[in-house]
Image (tube, rainbow, N blue to C red):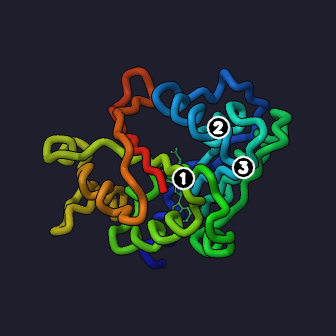
């Protein structure tokens, strides 16, 4: 099994055994500033894509906020997609679909066909050497004036690394129990990675009330 397959297996197991459920907008509200940014840049986007969408909460939130946009969630995990797709159906959402997909699914979409791209905690959980191929696809897929909302985890410092028991390599990448878990890049590295987009702003984002502060970045093409 290569490293990408190991990562996919890890996440697929993490989403195992969750049965699809009927969800209201209240259930999937992600809070600020995510909702504010979606509210500002989502409704004008005919198509919203979330790559590495996991169980789909962020895109479900976006689908409620932007009822006239077509929302597509892609993820390699069959378990995550079964939950997301089943829950969207049970919740009566007509403007959203979820598919099992990897980079080939992005490559099959036409250039400049996406008004808003969401990528949350995907680019920072894959090896650095693979990040650029996704950056290329995101930049290609965005329409002119389209937006990217990028979310990555909090930066893992030496204290946190020791607590979580990870092993760090010379590139700063972290593996836990032999599974790749974070490429752990500082803000500037993410901003510089998207050379074809203009960086607009960065914000802290706390998904859970007492959880860590993840990092949100907003870009425009
Ligand atoms: C940390 S989770 C993030 C899930 C969700 N976006 C969120 O913010 O909660 C990383 C996601 O990336 C997906 N993933 C990992 N490797 C992938 C690949 N090569 N192609 C597509 N998705 C992948 C996993 O299945 C998992 O759902």
Label placed on residue 37: none
The residue shown at (78%, 40%) is 68
SS category of the residue bearing label 2:
helix
Q: CA distance from mark 3 to mark 1?
A: 13 Å
The residue shown at (68%, 71%) is 110
The residue shown at (40%, 32%) is 205
The residue shown at (35%, 35%) is 203
- Measured as percent of width and height from the top left, residue 7 is found at 46, 64
Marked residue nearer the N-terminal end (2 or 1): 2
Q: Write down the residue under mark 1.
A: 145
| Circles 3, 2 touching at the beta carbon (< 8 Å) | no
Disc 1, ligand 1: is the CB inside 8 Å?
Answer: no
- Measured as percent of width and height from the top left, residue 168 is found at 20, 61
Q: Write down the residue under mark 2.
A: 62
- Measured as percent of width and height from the top left, residue 16 is found at 63, 49
Rate crowding at label 2 as few (under 14), some (14 to 19) or many (20 or more) other CA atoms within 10 Å. Answer: many
Q: Write down the residue under mark 3.
A: 46
User: Relative to 206, does residue 214 appear above or below in the rendering?
Assistant: below
On screen, residue 74 versus residue 163, left or right, reads: right
Marked residue nearer the N-terminal end (3 or 1): 3
Q: Quadrant of residue 129?
A: bottom left
């Amino acid at each position: 099994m290569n490293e990408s397959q190991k990562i996919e297996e890890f996440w697929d197991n993490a989403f195992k055994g969750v049965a699809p459920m009927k969800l209201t907008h209240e259930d999937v509200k992600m809070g600020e500033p995510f909702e504010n940014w979606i509210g500002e840049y989502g409704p004008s986007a005919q198509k919203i894509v979330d790559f590495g969408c996991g169980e789909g909460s962020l895109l479900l939130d976006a689908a409620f906020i932007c009822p006239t946009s077509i929302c597509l969630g892609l993820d390699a995990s069959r378990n995550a997609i079964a939950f997301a797709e089943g829950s969207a159906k049970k919740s009566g959402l007509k403007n959203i679909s979820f598919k099992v997909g990897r980079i080939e699914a992005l490559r099959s979409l036409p250039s400049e066909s996406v008004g808003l791209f969401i990528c949350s905690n995907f680019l920072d959980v894959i090896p650095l050497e693979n990040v650029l191929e996704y950056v290329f696809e995101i930049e290609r897929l965005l329409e002119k004036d389209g937006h990217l909302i990028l979310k990555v985890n909090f930066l893992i410092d030496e204290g946190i690394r020791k607590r979580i028991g990870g092993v760090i390599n010379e590139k700063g990448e972290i593996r836990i129990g032999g599974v790749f878990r974070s490429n752990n890049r500082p803000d500037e590295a993410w901003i510089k990675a998207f050379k074809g987009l203009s960086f607009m702003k960065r914000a802290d984002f706390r998904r859970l009330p007492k959880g860590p502060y993840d990092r949100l970045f907003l870009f425009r093409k």
